[in-house]
Image (cartoon, grey):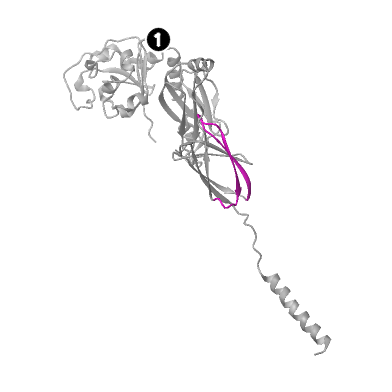
Amino acid sequence: MTGIAVHRVHSRWLGVVVAALLLTPVPVAAQGPNTLRGRVIDETSRPVSFAQIAVLPGDRRIVTDQNGDFSIAGLTDGQYELRVRRIGYAPGTVQVRIPGEQRSVTITLIPLPRVLDSVRIRERSLILRYTGIVLDDLNEPVVGAEVIAAGASDLDVRTDSAGHFRLAKPQKGMLVLRIRKFGYTPYFGSLTFSAEREDTIRVKRHPQDLPEAYIRIESGFGRDTFAYVELDSRMRWKVPGSGVASREDLDRWGDMDLCQALMRTPAAASMELRESHCPQPQCIIIDGLQPVIRPLNTFLAAEVEAVEFHRRDLTGTINSRKGVACSARVLSGQTSAELPRSRTGRVGRTVAPPTLVPGGQVIWMRRRP
């Protein structure tokens, strides 16, 4: 074979090899979204629930569930920093690379010491702080929601970019909380406030295709707003002899009628409540708006969110709601046979109405989903 022929054969084979290399696919690093899962625990490997996690770079924030688990979807390739916070723990930080060999990450938070110096103990004894986070039904923070604590000194409190809020209440007792934002179901709840605490509160988004007027009312901006304004006034102007029972006070006795449950709460002393009072007709304002005449034992404790009892009402809001429906003449003409049955199912003889006082009772019913 001549030199020219050998050169042609070599060139032909070289062309075939180059073409094969060009047609062979070269693996490329995936650039699509990734999901990172993990768990937040303490030093004893117990889960840390409702810890707040900030993802940097970016402004994404998520909250761990009751088991301390979390899932972050839609992460592009790159280096991230997870900053974890929870009241009672030192902040934690962890670096992760996406994609990486680790498909999940465990973050350990260190509890803060509970021993405080004498100055700080004195400060905490004067002011208790109540903090919380507001999430929607998709577990996303609700930003800019209005937080109203009846009777508290905090004004114009709104949730921040992570859904957090903080209230400073100068004394222990019952806290009645109302949270609202246009486009979400309003929250109304009560709690017994005896120490600093943090709660997670959930609200639900309204469908966007509903009329704006309907959404406004269902978001807590309807006429019943006045009832909550009056509640705030009464909580600010309580006098000795007034009492309030929260949902947390009543929960232990949820299977009892309201009268029997109230007798087992701290409010019973202020109300001077006795067994003989249970079947007596009372003038009661329901949800701060509707006056009715019913004995306390016709309510079930599990149905009630909070109970106000005011021996004197300096605001005049209770008397203005009573009207003629709760006049002395109407009360004196009532008999137990004309009233709803008690939770025991008994209907007795005519009973004398309680002594009328320049105050009254307000029962707030639990809001159903």
| Quadrant the N terminus occupies | bottom right
Image quarter of residue 335: top left
Which quadrant of the figure contains the C terminus?
Answer: top left
Q: Residue at x 76, y 81 (%)?
A: 12
Using the image as rendered, state which of residue 358 and residue 174 is in the foreground: 174
Residue at numbered disc 1: 239
Residue at the left extreme of this rendering: 349
Q: Position of residue 146 (x, y in %)?
A: 52, 27
Question: Height in image: 314 above or below 295?
Answer: above
The percent coordinates of residue 246 (x first, y second) are: 37, 23
Left or right: 272, with 187 as reference point? left
Q: Decide whether residue 80 is among the magenta residues.
A: yes
Left of 191 or right of it: where is 58?
right
Q: Secondary structure at mark 1?
A: loop
Above or below for 20 versus 353: below
**Magenta-drawn segment:** 77-102
**For this rendering, which residue is in front, 74 or 6?**
6
